Image: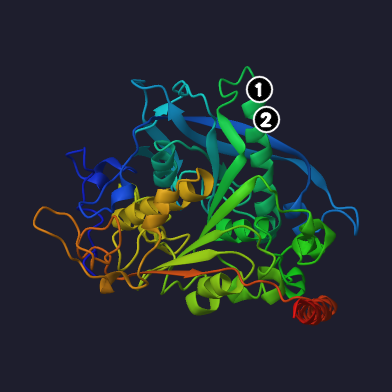
């Protein structure tokens, strides 16, 4: 791989000092594909505090609280960081204060979004995209995606999932049960913000035209939210949702059948966890009812590849879906920001070098981020904005490195050019992009018999008409 071990040496295209020295999230590799570039819009960012009232307190249930059929409840707090197109020329603070994976070290990240900048004027609302981090994680883990997409005309709401952040990592069952509920609650709150004349965002957020991006456990949540009901076996795991609380997401249950929201038009799952632990089967995955893009490293030891992400992609038979694979990549493919400078140390409590939470042994983080930005721009523009031309960036030869680079002296491409659109020569090496179309559900037997009868009857009618005509 030509992108090995470059993380600390790459620089942002518009910034002279090293990326790592400033903990920048906006790095652009010299080999970045075309659609990774920032859009034309200025970007603002602000923090929003939300409370989802009267929710089951999964942590308390796991600790033995409540009685069967009467679990303790609480008002669940959620912090959301929202990136959005802003008025041009806004000035102010462009830093983000975030905690590292160790849960104790606070660092400063640098981007381009101006804190609390006034939103851009627009006659049409901007499509909404929600970001959902891993376990543990935080709302800044995919901030490079959030800021980049906002510059292209999206409002991006990145969620701090309570009980799943670096600072409050708690019962795993809370993550399993609450991820889809958090995602849909934030969708509702963004819709309310769009209607609130005092918010400054009235008429600017198109929550009826929303996308969802989830990484690791956020990817698990995205699959459930998209219709992928979990198995009965996973509901019964003693280390999972306590007291059967995960049953609300079981395939075929009334609660799960009511979960998918028609406002969410597409979802992207990056390294989604769960298949390798028995959380889905054929029935559950067939419940996914919106187009999905999956992104994975072929050596993902956390979520698995052949028995994990790839198996989910193959099993989502009811919808059109795609799989982008980084050969040799691990679980940190595409999603995490470049490792902050302060993360390069060994932490005795978590027993690994904190930087490993952000880096990949094979691929450079900035380049992976750029590839992710490129594909997510094409995918979301196509699915949420109806931009058919972006489909050309997704109509690709399966193996990136096997495409033919064929150009004239003036830079125009010849008819036999098959290299990935938007990628410079040689830069698609090690990447794969595969597409599967929805498989039509089999026609039930009674309907088949009925159709056969109509066909036979139609042939008979045609024969009688022919006899009458002679």
Instruction: State the image coordinates of residue 147 (x, y, percent, origin top left).
Output: 41, 39
Outermost residue to the front: 470
Q: Are marks 1 and 2 in contact (CB under 8 Å)?
A: yes
In the rendered structure, the answer to whether residue 121 lies left or right of residue 17 reads right
Instruction: Give the residue displayed 82% in from the left and 75% down from the top.
Output: 447
- Marks 1 and 2 sit apart, C-alpha to C-alpha, by 6 Å
Report whether residue 336 is seen: no
For the C terminus, give its image quadrant. bottom right
In the foreground, 433 or 392: 392
What label does residue 270 carry, if any?
none
Give the residue number, with chain letter if any, for mark 1: 196
The residue most toward the top is 198
Secondary structure at numbered mark 2: helix
- Apparent side of residue 336 relative to residue 161 in the rendered image (left or right): left
Mark 1: secondary structure:
loop
Q: Quadrant of residue 276?
A: bottom right
**On the image, numbered disc 2 is attached to which residue?**
192
User: Dot 1: within a 10 Å radius of its alpha carbon, few (fewer than 14), some, or many (20 or more) residues?
Assistant: few
- From this view, report whether residue 250 is shown above or below residue 343: below
In the picture shown, does residue 355 fall above or below 418? above
Between 154 and 7, the one nearer to me in the picture: 154
Residue at 43% across, 44% down = 143
- Residue 129 in percent (x, y) is at 54, 43
Q: Residue at x 45, y 50 (%)?
A: 388
């Amino acid at each position: 791989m030509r992108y090995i071990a470059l993380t600390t040496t790459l620089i942002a295209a518009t910034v002279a000092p090293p990326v790592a020295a400033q903990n920048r999230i906006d790095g652009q590799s010299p080999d970045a594909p075309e659609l990774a570039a920032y859009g034309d819009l200025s970007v603002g960012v602000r923090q929003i505090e939300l409370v989802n009232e009267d929710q089951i307190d999964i942590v308390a249930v796991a600790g033995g609280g409540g009685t069967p059929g009467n679990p303790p409840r609480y008002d669940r707090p959620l912090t959301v960081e929202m990136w959005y197109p802003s008025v041009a020329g806004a000035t102010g603070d462009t830093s983000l204060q975030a905690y590292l994976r160790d849960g104790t070290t606070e660092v400063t990240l640098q981007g381009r979004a101006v804190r609390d900048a006034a939103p851009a004027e627009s006659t049409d609302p901007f499509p909404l995209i929600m970001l959902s981090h891993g376990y543990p994680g935080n709302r800044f883990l995919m901030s490079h995606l959030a800021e980049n997409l906002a510059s292209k005309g999206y409002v991006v709401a990145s969620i701090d999932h309570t009980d799943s952040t670096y600072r409050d990592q708690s019962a795993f069952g809370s993550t399993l049960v609450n991820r889809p509920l958090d995602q849909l609650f934030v969708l509702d709150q963004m819709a309310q913000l769009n209607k609130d004349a005092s918010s400054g965002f009235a008429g600017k957020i198109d929550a009826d035209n929303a996308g969802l991006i989830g990484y690791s456990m956020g990817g698990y949540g995205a699959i459930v939210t998209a219709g992928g009901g979990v198995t009965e076996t996973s509901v019964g795991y003693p280390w999972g949702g306590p007291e059967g609380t995960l049953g609300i997401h079981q395939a075929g249950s009334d609660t799960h059948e009511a979960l998918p929201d028609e406002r969410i038009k597409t979802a992207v799952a990056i390294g989604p966890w769960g298949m390798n632990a028995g959380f889905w089967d054929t029935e559950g995955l067939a419940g996914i009812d919106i187009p999905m893009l999956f992104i994975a490293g072929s050596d993902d030891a956390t979520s698995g590849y052949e028995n994990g992400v790839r198996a989910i992609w193959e099993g989502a038979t009811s919808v059109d879906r795609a799989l982008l694979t980084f050969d040799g990549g691990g679980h940190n493919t595409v999603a995490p920001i470049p490792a902050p400078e302060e993360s390069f140390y060994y932490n005795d409590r978590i027993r690994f070098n904190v930087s490993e939470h952000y880096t990949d042994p094979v691929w450079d983080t900035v380049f992976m981020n750029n590839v992710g930005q490129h594909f997510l721009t094409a995918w979301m523009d196509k699915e949420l904005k109806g931009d058919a031309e972006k489909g050309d960036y997704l109509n690709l030869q399966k193996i990136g490195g096997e495409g033919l680079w064929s150009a004239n002296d003036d830079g125009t491409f010849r008819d036999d050019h098959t290299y990935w659109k938007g990628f410079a020569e040689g830069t698609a090496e090690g990447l794969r992009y595969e597409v599967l179309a929805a498989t039509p559900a089999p026609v039930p037997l009674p309907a088949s018999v009925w159709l056969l009868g109509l066909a036979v009857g139609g042939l008979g009618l045609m024969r009688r008409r022919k006899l009458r005509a002679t």
